[in-house]
Amino acid sequence: MLKRVLIANRGEIALRIFRACRECGMETVAVYSEADSEALHVQLATRSVCIGPAPAGESYLNQEAVLEVALSTGCDGIHPGYGFLSENADFADACKKAGLTFIGPSGETIRMAGSKSSARKRMREAGVPVPPGADGTLSSEAMALEVAERVGYPVLLKASAGGGGRGIRRCDGPEQLPSAYAQARAEAKACFGNEELYLEKLVLRPRHIEVQVLADRHGNVIHLGDRDCSIQRRNQKLIEEAPAWGLSPALREKMGAAAVRAARAVGYENAGTVEFLLDQDGEQFYFMEMNTRIQVEHGITELVTGVDLVREQLRIASGLPLSLTQKEVTLSGCAMECRINAENPQENFRPDPGVVTFLHFPGGNGVRVDSCLYQGWELSPYYDSLAAKLLVHGHTRLDAVKKMRRSLEEFTLEGFQTNGELSYQILYHPDFVRGCCTTAFLEENLPALLDFNRRLREKEESE
Ligand code: ADP
Ligand code: ADP
Ligand code: MG
């Protein structure tokens, strides 16, 4: 097994990786920015080294600095977490060249899967269905118009290097195309330093269903069931559940098999996620993208399968075979996750960072909190607004819903605004309770949910 792992990340995922390393008997080295010297995992790691100022470009994304620390502190592995360098093929290559184990797939695989336009093409060739659209990137606005005309409106223009829901623009007709094209390109350039776009037909009112896969160096590829991540705002996930509710065993089997085929098609190694859209009839599904890293919502799969995914990542990177076979994967009960972000839903989800002045986490049977928060910690405006993940595990979906409501009631955080109350309202919405919401759910119901929240608050204040 690896002996000493550098954690090239921050926040809750850095802590999550730290915990898995410790349980595997590995030492850890934290790298951090000047804004994170008081972070929990920095305090807990065997060694911690500051690699630069707060802006990620000068610290967490500084490949040379990260590699230098790994080498000078005697690390043999680097875990990139999610975001930052996790899907950077050049970084994976650079680790290998420096004699370090990148805990993830090879640079070559990341390159294939990470360019969303080329992944689309490769999946189609491997017999995995993709939405109608352009193969490869768009070379001009005229080409975008031509493809949109061919597949039919509405369409989505999407950043080829995209992630986190950014660089995506909907377009309902040719008159909207020029501005959508310019906006998507500008956002792609700003977020990913790459303005290449591709185009897909918009799948109407779909569900976002993804499949967790694991692959080792010995040719074993398995899947660990699915997750439904349809509760999204601006194409970003807010509430997730595992397994996806209401899928027939036959469809579940088909999607799992397609995910394994997708992983094999890019020579996958380590933990990854294949994201699909399921159309509104619940019959046809389409490949959307493959995330070549640990996913934010991996914990709900851990709760229903009992598999520690980060531990599997460490084992795979150490050259060990998967610790279970496909037949040994069993799903038990239902798990749900709410992402608690430091943001104000009433003001278009504007990030609202600040100092945690009071904190109480829910607990009890079947409740897990993954978070880097503690009382007195300042959530920095420099990074992602994700503050905590509340996870619950129940025997049935309704058990999980009730447990999540109870957990949100108990969860107390003072110092900044979060989306916690909004998530609480969602958990009482009849459509949500029934299950099988589409990705349109939140947008369609947001005004009513926010209005209810606003009136509740006014009532509380007047009492
Ligand atoms: P997941 O499917 O794991 O939830 P998301 O797409 O929501 O993935 O992104 C997870 C995290 O990684 C978010 O913090 C997001 O901002 C970040 N992220 C995702 N893709 C990229 C990317 N290409 N570049 C930078 N950050 C990214
Ligand atoms: P990212 O890399 O930012 O996560 P994805 O390709 O995974 O981008 O898309 C993010 C979200 O956008 C999806 O979860 C889905 O809600 C929506 N989306 C993406 N492509 C389509 C499509 N062709 N039709 C309908 N919705 C889509
Ligand atoms: Mg995605």
Image (cartoon, grey):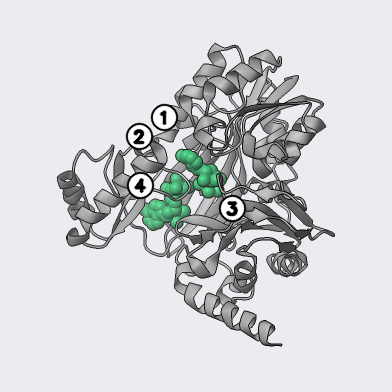
Is any part of residue 428 visible from this angle?
Answer: yes
Q: Are marks 2 and 1 in contact (CB under 8 Å)?
A: yes
Where's the C terminus, which quadrant?
bottom right
Mark toward the viewer: 3 or 4? 4
Q: Where is residue 103 drawn, in percent x and y?
A: 62, 26
Residue under label 3, please give it: 227
Task: Give the label on residue 187, or none.
Answer: 4
Mark toward the viewer: 2 or 4? 4
Whole-angstrom CA distance, mark 2 to mark 3, is 24 Å
Whole-angstrom CA distance, mark 2 to mark 4, is 20 Å
Compare marks 2 and 4 and give the one earlier in the sequence.
Answer: 2
Residue under label 1, please give it: 112
Residue 278 in which image quadrant: bottom left
At mark 4, the secondary structure is helix
Q: Are marks 3 and 1 in contact (CB under 8 Å)?
A: no
Whole-angstrom CA distance, mark 3 to mark 4, is 28 Å
**In front of the other: 276 or 356:** 356
Q: Is mark 4 within 8 Å of ligand 2?
A: no
Whole-angstrom CA distance, mark 2 to mark 1, is 7 Å
Compare marks 2 and 1 and give the one earlier in the sequence.
Answer: 1
